[in-house]
Image (cartoon, rainbow, N blue to C red):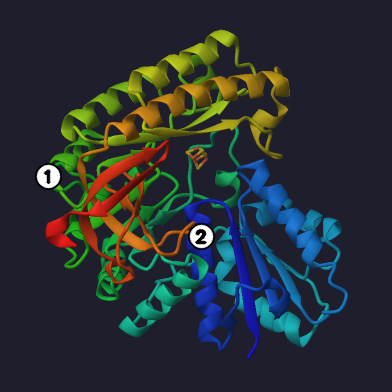
Amino acid sequence: MPTLYIKTYGCQMNERDSEQVARMFVQKGYTLTDRENEADVILFNSCSIREQAEQKALGKMGLLSKQQHRPHVVYGMMGCMAQSKKDELFKELPRLDLVVGTQKYHRVFEHVDGILRARQERRMDELQTAFSGTRVCDVAEEADSQNRIRDHLNPGARSTAYVSIMQGCEMKCAYCIVPYTRGTERSRPIRDIVEEVNMLADAGVKEVTLLGQIVNRYGREMPAADGKGGFVQLLEAVHEVEGLKRIRFVSPHPIGFRQDLVQAFTYLPKLCSHIHFPMQSGSDRILKMMRRPYRNETFLDLCARMKQARPDLSITTDIIVGFPGETEEDYLLTRQAVEQVQFDNAFIFRYSPRRGTPAAAMEGQIPEEVKEARNQDLLAVVNEIAIRKNRELVGTVQEVLLEGPSKTNEERLSGRTSQNRPVIVDAAPDLAGQLLPIRIEESTGFTLYGVPCPSRA
Ligand code: SF4
């Protein structure tokens, strides 16, 4: 039986796509392996938003494809990076057999099969925008098979699942390659999504994360119902799924983030008390150059209204430092916004030009040492807030979804609070998959440690 090794470098959307591709191979008789040296097919699904992910994927694929003793192996690259670099990849990686863009995942198996039969034939999938609209599972056994694939790709994550609700983005941020690789916005019907979540819940999933480039623009074409837009209608429908305990979504955008969504935090208890809300910059001048069509005041106001709706809400964010033209004053506005919102955590990125994006050609590129200094300075502010907030939780009881064995110590379980804080719990392995009240006993910076409350242990 042929074996597939598939590795994801990128965001949850890429992980989700890898699961879909893996499922196709399993249905056709492949087994999944986590040993690249034993695989007959090696696929990398890589993101091109971050240069680091791209370099890692390219470096690793370069090394693997030098294995002279395994000439039959099929090597493929998929995802945003594959889509943006296209033929160039074949030049950089002479052993590469396959390049597949983001809209053509459903054809990966077909191509690999063709290559296996015609060996060294190389194929380049033309990049088109038709949404495959693939439904994840048609019958319950397939939901189970999907979860086994997820277990393989992301061990211990059986109690949680990603559900793709839409594809594409029409915002065209100046630094981002996504609009050129994932096409225009297309939303899946509510009925299909609810069906998928139902099957996942039947298979034991307790928490779903709804994925989209801008989730709150989901179903923009749908008529409002009781003043609620498409995304809130979807949240309400998913909330009804029996057995499902938690709902998360990622990522929202200030544009189209309406009061109905703020309000949803007041009456949908399954909606977790966490939102990852990318701010990118605290300077209106830089936001404009980034082509992010909102003012920082709008972003701050939304954060304040969400916290009012759900007082224990944790807000995390993405920030880019060193965008072309960013002055010290612009940077200080970002720092000020971070201090005002008191983000629970933030991913800070030093701007790196992505080929084919408008920002890459902008004047005023910032020297690396300035980017690095701003990165370190902001990281110190963010870390101080995050560590303090974690420390404040020692002695409290938090509801934690125990996802599986801890990566660092298999005798413990790891899980997350509703606020998405990681917690390592001293608990029996058979408690994995359960949502339990956990007493937080210790905090070491970013990780909490706890034990189940006695009445429930
Ligand atoms: S909103 Fe901007 S950063 Fe996000 S996917 Fe769309 S273009 Fe990229």
Label 2 crowding class (10 Å Cα cut-off): few <14, some 14-19, many 20+? many
Give whichever of discs 2 and 1 has the lower sequence position.
2
Mark 1: which secondary structure? helix
Q: Position of residue 15 (x, y in %)?
A: 51, 60
Structural distance between the alpha carbons of marks 2 and 1: 30 Å
Residue visible at 18% across and 28% down in the picture: 308
The quadrant holding residue 260 is: top left
Image quadrant occupied by the N terminus: bottom right
Q: Point out the residue furthest to the top here.
A: 329
The amino acid on which the numbered mark 1 sits, given as a three-letter code, is: Tyr
The amino acid on which the numbered mark 2 sits, given as a three-letter code, is: Glu
Residue 314 horizontal side relative to residue 333, left or right: left
Name the residue carrying label 1.
267
| Label disc, if present, on residue 15 of the rendered structure | 2
Residue visible at 54% across and 8% down in the picture: 329
> In the displayed structure, would residue 439 be above or below residue 260?
below
Mark 2: which secondary structure? helix
